[in-house]
Amino acid sequence: MDISHFSSRGSQKSGQNLPPTRTNRNTYKFFASRSSSVTQQSLNCSPQNSPFGVPDLGHPDLIKKPLKMRSFEKFKIWVLLICLVFELGYGFYLPGSYPHKYGVGDLLNVKVNSLTSIDTELPYSYYSLPFCQPQEGVKDSAENLGELLMGDRIENSPYRFKMYTNETEIFMCQSKPLSGEEFKLLKKRIDEMYQVNLILDNLPAIRYTRKAGYFLRWTGYPVGIKVQDAYYVFNHLKFTVLVHKYEETNVARVMGTGDGAEVISTVGKDGSEEPGYMVVGFEVVPCSVQHAPDSAKNLKMYNKYPTPIKCDPTTVAMAIKENEPVSFTYEVNFVESDIKWPSRWDAYLKMEGAKVHWFSILNSLMVITFLAGIVLVIFLRTVRRDLTRYEELDKEAQAQMNEELSGWKLVVSDVFRAPSNPGLLCAMVGDGVQILGMGVVTIMFAALGFMSPASRGTLITGMLFFYMILGVAAGYVAVRLWRTIFCGDHKGWISVSWKAACFFPGIAFLILTTLNFLLWGSHSTGAIPFSLFVVLILLWFCISVPLTLVGGYLGAKAPHIEYPVRTNQIPREIPPQKYPSWLLVLGAGTLPFGTLFIELFFIMSSLWMGRVYYVFGFLLIVMILLVIVCAEVSLVLTYMHLCVEDWKWWWKSFFASGSVAIYIFLYSVNYLIFDLKSLSGPVSATLYLGYSLFMVLAIMLATGTVGFLSSFWFVHFLFSSVKLD
């Protein structure tokens, strides 16, 4: 787990100081020695020493050692390696989470992100409004591909502080007289409740408001406010920077930051040790202050404003008017805090009703585990009873068996008959394996802390990277399933590989392109630039497609799965059913939906309400339970269809668990109507539904693949475990 942001409470309880101090370096040496010893033992390829190799049966000690004892030794080694990984995680920062120490008077640069609003969900550039621009010009500070895909546009700003130096009445600039278009745009952004997002040392600016005796926490501050018929802009910012004294002195080290590496020394010019500080909090109070236009005529940026400025957030005074300028000022106050650097993200990660959140998740997990256990017990007992009954019939009444048989044994000659549209099924199963693998690996890395909220965009970047790499698995599974359906015939494997490489990415490309045109038309920063579009297409055709073809080649070379029974040339007629089989298939998605609907609410809130999602450990547990329940539901549905002599189980097993996507989409529509009431405009609603459709398609492929593969294993096991004539 990433202890830089998510495990700060545990680190404080254990008395560890997470910055890489001298004690931590000794801890690293200790664990490194243990790691090297374990690695040497594991990499020793001699049969008698390797715990993972084949033992030398000629060795007298190994002859006497039972097999269970050797398995127990392997288990101990795996436990040691897992504990080693977690202990190293508690002793060191994971990538992207190194602290930056500043000396007194060092320059602190504030960055700006896109203007955001939960009313429209359309981000816009900070400098699209008539705000002050830096003297050196606007520069882009995006660090990875994920930031651009999320619509973040991080840029430099004119706000500059000096570490531990309080300043007041600092003049920024005076805008030009507002033109008619600027005046209308500013009023529109205020009506749509747009927020200004500032960043200092990778910490977003946070704002506290008091309401009914409670403190509410917000990220960023509003552009302005409307009072009756007048519009007021917040043109004076009162910053509070919380700092914590660096605990290790007289050491010069290289610290990695987002702006590059710097060598920071804590030794002053006269040889005395000067304290260094780390930023552990960034708060802002916006105020609307009336400035006299004549007072700012001869002032330059960072000059002191000639008259005192009183920041009162309960009153507003700076009304915007057409053809009149707006002056911007700020003040900054540094406060030494007891908050340690690993705990500085706690204020952002706290969620209202946290106890309800944990209780709901745990309650859901217990209920779903209980239901899954019941389904599993019933399923095992039913299948075991049928197998026992049919085997007894084989022994007692060989001549009359065909007359007395009923249920799934009657479809023995048709159960492995090729389904309709086998190429599409293979492509969808291959893409499902790719998406499911991407989700599991990404959530595991996020749970370990490699993709924390402090590292913006790393979650999307990681998902994109893992998806491309797992193209090998998609091609392999799709082609091997194709060869299995056609009894080892490898013809057409290239076509199947291309379908697997282009089916889901092609649909996603169409959806995202359509939504991108809407964003382009709205001049939103959420629109993917054309150059980034070209990069994504190159990643698709130069990395993902070749890897999928490589996986298909490996699948064509791998042996196919042989059927335990033969298939007749003439298909058996399916008897009429009392109820439509597809109705039961669609209803089967309710149980998997019950495993994730509570967690889905928090995910939707983080995506559309501007909240931070961080409980990836619970999400990993929910995902594992979802896989188990999807497999069990699909197995039961497949068995029920076989019992009524319906041998067309291929697609039904896929959609039995994949139908959970229908309920997720209905939940998304419900969330749009009842939770996103303020979402205004057809463009915003179209974007929401488009992204929801994209998410639902990926979930359908992943869950459907789980159900199909588990059903395929069950059918193969069932018909290979009973004697058939």
Image: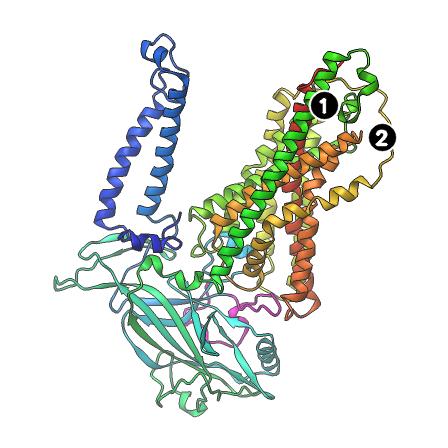
- The reply to whether the magenta stretch includes residue 93 is no
Q: Secondary structure at mark 1?
A: loop
**Residue 591 appearing in the image:** yes
Res 600 → quadrant: bottom right
Q: Secondary structure at mark 2?
A: loop
- On screen, residue 336 above or below 141: below
416 with respect to 123 (left or right) = right
What amino acid is labelled 2 in the image? Ile
Q: Earlier in the sequence, mark 1 or mark 2?
A: 1
Q: Residue at x 39, y 60 (%)?
A: 345
What amino acid is labelled 1 in the image? Lys
Which segment did they paint magenta? 114-139
Q: Quadrant of the C terminus?
A: top right
Residue that lies at the very extreme toward the top in this rendered image: 58
Give the residue number, with chain letter if any, for mark 1.
491
- The reply to whether the magenta stretch includes residue 137 is yes
Q: Is the C-beta separation of discs 1 and 2 under 8 Å? A: no
Res 454 → quadrant: bottom left
Give the residue number, with chain letter if any, for mark 2.
574
- On screen, residue 418 above or below 370: above
- The x and y percentages for residue 164 are 27, 71
Between residues 494 and 688, which one lies in front from this camera angle?
688
- The x and y percentages for residue 556 are 64, 23
- The x and y percentages for residue 67 are 41, 17
Between residues 431 and 576, which one lies in front from this camera angle?
576
